[in-house]
Image (cartoon, rainbow, N blue to C red):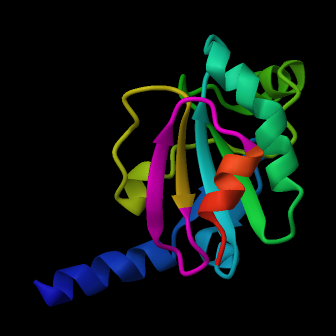
Amino acid sequence: MTGCILVLLAACDRAAFEDARGDTLNWDDLRGQWVVVNYWAEWCKPCLEEIPELNRLDRSERITVLGVNFDGITGQPLRDVARKMDIDFRLLAEDPGPKLGWDLPVGLPASFVVNPDGELVETRFGAQTEDGLMELMQP
């Protein structure tokens, strides 16, 4: 059993994801900072409400916000929707959940909060605020 856990952890350490621009994001490169992986959709009103909060949060040097479109939009259509919705944070072209051992959220918006050690510490549902997420990330 311990061997299986080590294999899973090693796989997570090498996880890489394509972003909306076609660039590769290595999960390991995010170590040492907080990461908020936010699942959103164009039709989700609470998602629209939290975008300015997540944009501000992403400006922090110690926090990265990554967006995942719940409807699976990719490429130029994803970039167009992001521009229309004023999303400034980086968008992933694929759901990182399966590689990281996360289940697809059952409601939107959903924010998976990962600590600087790479551990999922909390999943939040509903529109989040910058202050609320910052409070969770206090040392």
* Outermost residue to the left: 1
Q: In this view of the protein, can residue 18 be seen by the observer? A: no
* Residue 136, above or below 33: above
Which of the image's four quarters has the N terminus?
bottom left
- The foreground one among 48 and 131 is 131
Q: In this view, does 100 lie to the left or right of 42?
A: left
User: Where residue 78 appears, x then y in whole percent?
Assistant: 74, 27
* Residue 32, above or below 90: below
Quarter-of-image position of residue 129? top right
Which residue shows up at 45% across the image and 56% down it?
A: 122
Which residue shows up at 64% across the image and 66% down it?
A: 137
Q: Is residue 58 left or right of residue 115?
A: right
User: Where residue 103 appears, x then y in whole percent?
Assistant: 34, 45
Q: In this view of the protein, can residue 112 be seen by the observer? A: yes
Q: In this view, does 130 lie to the left or right of 132?
A: right
* Residue 12, above or below 40: below
Which residue shows up at 57% across the image and 71% down it?
A: 115
Which residue shows up at 82% across the image and 30% down it?
A: 79
Range covered by the magenta-colored residues: 114-129
Which of the image's four quarters has the C terminus?
bottom right
Q: Is residue 121 magenta?
A: yes
Quarter-of-image position of residue 50? top right
- The foreground one among 129 and 76 is 129
